[in-house]
Amino acid sequence: MIGREILNKMKEKACFSTPLTPDAKKGGSKFSKHVTHGSHLMKGKANHAMEDYLVSELKMIDENELGLFAIYDGHMGHDVANYLQLHLFNNILKQSDFWTDIKIALKNAYQKTDKEILEKSLQLGKGGSTAVTAILINGQKLIVANVGDSRAVISKKGVANQLSVDHEPSREKKLIESKGGFVSNLPGDVPRVDGQLAVARAFGDKSLKRHVSSEPDIAVETIDDDAEFVILASDGLWKVMSNQEAVDSIKTIKDPHAAAKHLIDEALSRKSKDDISCIVVRFQ
């Protein structure tokens, strides 16, 4: 158990970020050599600045090793996604119940961060961002939380299992309508909240906040001997690849950075036009 002194240090010093560049990054655990991670980003063909951000790193906190991994996919600007990159994990680690009830800690931190973003809407703009976060504790337990359609997929014995939930407007139509909103479903377009947003949950989006939730879905996965790797990626990948196709595509690639880059290259070959960010975490 981490003492109050360590928690205070975490509150003061925790800041985990990855620069915004179409770049690749890889790393490995100094303390758990079986855990390695790599990441890659690629700007899409849309006529705007890159809107994806990511976090991918391992941190020792006292006797505990934390893997902190996240994909933030901004829309209508990149400022909200950038804010999440700089602040969401900090807010999670500041929660007093992080080590005793991590699900409550995650929900509270997501809510707190969304409130901060809405309060700063004059600086951050009217846009928003999806998020999928994964926290690996001592290489043994993986806690995944998400809002939106960025996705986390684990491979166990070669079989893909989705750990996140795609928050599609059609999936949450009744809830949106109960709050006074509506879901459009025009021919040739995807379902949208109030005819605008293609996800039912997100950070920011102040003008739609009454109808768009920031409450995460949370999954806890034990990392046993069957677990091989986890993929986190923005929807630019998942629009053109199924979960199993993604797992099959990298199952023989041992280097996680090379695996993340391979997934993005494969998505591009399948004509994905969106920004794409990808993290691969290997457990062997």
Image (tube, grey):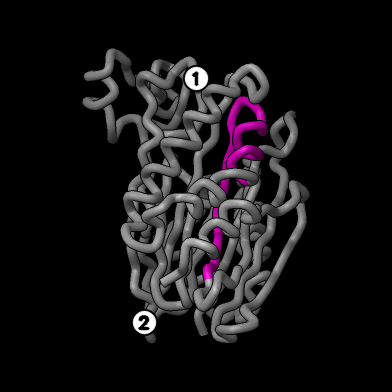
Q: Position of residue 114 (x, y in %)?
A: 48, 32
Three-letter amino acid code at disc 1? Lys
Three-letter amino acid code at disc 2? Asp
- Is 284 situated left or right of 49 in this image? left
Q: Name the residue under label 2.
A: 224
CA neighbours of label 1 inside 10 A, class few (<14), some (14 to 19), many (20+): some
Q: Which of 234 and 91 is in front in this view?
A: 91
Q: Residue 206, labelled with which disc? A: 1
Whether residue 67 appears in magenta in the rendering, the answer is: yes
Task: Determine the secondary structure under disc 1.
Answer: helix
Q: Going 27% across and 18% down the picture, which residue do you hit? A: 179
Q: Going 50% across and 23% down the picture, which residue do you hit? A: 205
- Is 99 situated left or right of 34 in this image? left
CA neighbours of label 2 inside 10 A, class few (<14), some (14 to 19), many (20+): few
**Residues drawn in magenta:** 66-85
Q: Where is residue 88 in the image (x, y as percent from the top left)?
A: 54, 45
Give the residue at the far front of this rendering.
5
